[in-house]
Structure formats: structure tokens, C-alpha cells
Image (tube, rainbow, N blue to C red):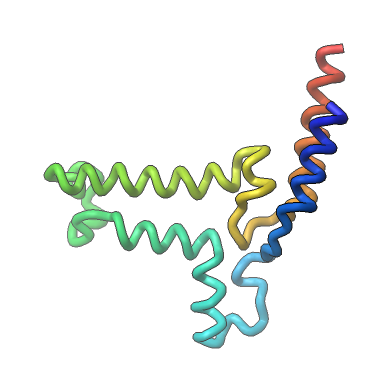
Amino acid sequence: IVTVFLLLSCSYVVYPRKRENRSILAYEDIIFEHVKNEKVEKDIVGKQIQFLSLYLPNTKHLGEGLHRMSRGWQAKISFCKLHYHLFKIFIRNEHTLLSAFQRTAGTNFSARQRLSCFFMYLCGIMVGNA
């Protein structure tokens, strides 16, 4: 387990990425348009909005139910693409190990905090197996 922790620590040092830990609403200068556009592109909420606007089919039927929106083969394929891209976003932030290296901006924990949570998870498993 110590070897795994050392490998993860070394990979964190080799793979440094500066990501914001604060939500997009926590910035004082978010009221300015250019700052908002710059921050929304990198934020998790901005990525969700981007994929919803790209892949959501039949938006004229929005609010009338999923069955009505998914009429036709192209709409069904578009829904599959939407679910796939949203899954990729959420797995990057929710998975214990992947979130340490591939998280998007605007999430609550830093990479260092996520690695220490993963190490505590491994220690808990070792104590449970002992």
C-alpha cells in the first residue's frame, strides 16, 4: 500500500494542474461578461450547459416529457451522446482515483485532498481486512 501511495504522490508531482476549487459564483468579478465567459468554459456547470445545448434534441418539446422529445432515430442517438458526455463529466469528478487527476474546475476538493481521501480509503480497507 505504501508503494501505491508513493506512486500516486510521484504522479501528482509530475502531473501538476492548477484547477480552481471554488464555484463560479464565489468570484467577486463574475458580474463582468468577459470574466463570466472565461470561467464558465472551464467550470463543471459550464460543461454541462454546453453538452445540454449541443445534444438535447427537439427542444421545442421541452417540458412535455422524455418520450415526446425522443421521437425519431436521430433524437435517440442524440440522447445517447448526451448521456455519454455527461457520464464522462461525472465520472471525472465522482470516481475516487480518476478525480485526483482529471477533475474539472469548480469542484470542491483539490487534487491533494482527493489523493489523501483515496489513501484513507485504502487504509480503511486494510484495517477492515486485518
- Residue depicted at 41% across the width and 48% down the height: 85
Quadrant for the C terminus in the image: top right
In the rendered image of this protein, does residue 128 appear above or below residue 53? above
Spot the residue most to the left.
Answer: 72
Q: Position of residue 62 (x, y in %)?
A: 24, 57
Quadrant for the N terminus in the image: top right
Is residue 8 or residue 27 the one in the foreground?
A: 8
Q: Position of residue 48 (x, y in %)?
A: 44, 58
Residue 122 vs residue 25: left or right?
A: right
- Residue depicted at 55% across the width and 64% down the height: 43
- Residue depicted at 45% across the width and 43% down the height: 87
Count of all numbered marks drawn on residues in the image: 0
In the rendered image of this protein, does residue 8 appear above or below residue 25? above
Spot the residue most to the top.
Answer: 130
Is residue 60 or residue 22 the one in the foreground?
A: 22
Q: Position of residue 78 (x, y in %)?
A: 25, 48
Residue 120 vs residue 57: left or right?
A: right
- Residue depicted at 59% across the width and 81% down the height: 30
Spot the residue most to the front.
Answer: 14
Residue 31 vs residue 12: left or right?
A: left
In the rendered image of this protein, does residue 84 appear above or below residue 121? below
In the rendered image of this protein, does residue 84 appear above or below residue 3? below
Q: Position of residue 28 (x, y in %)?
A: 67, 81
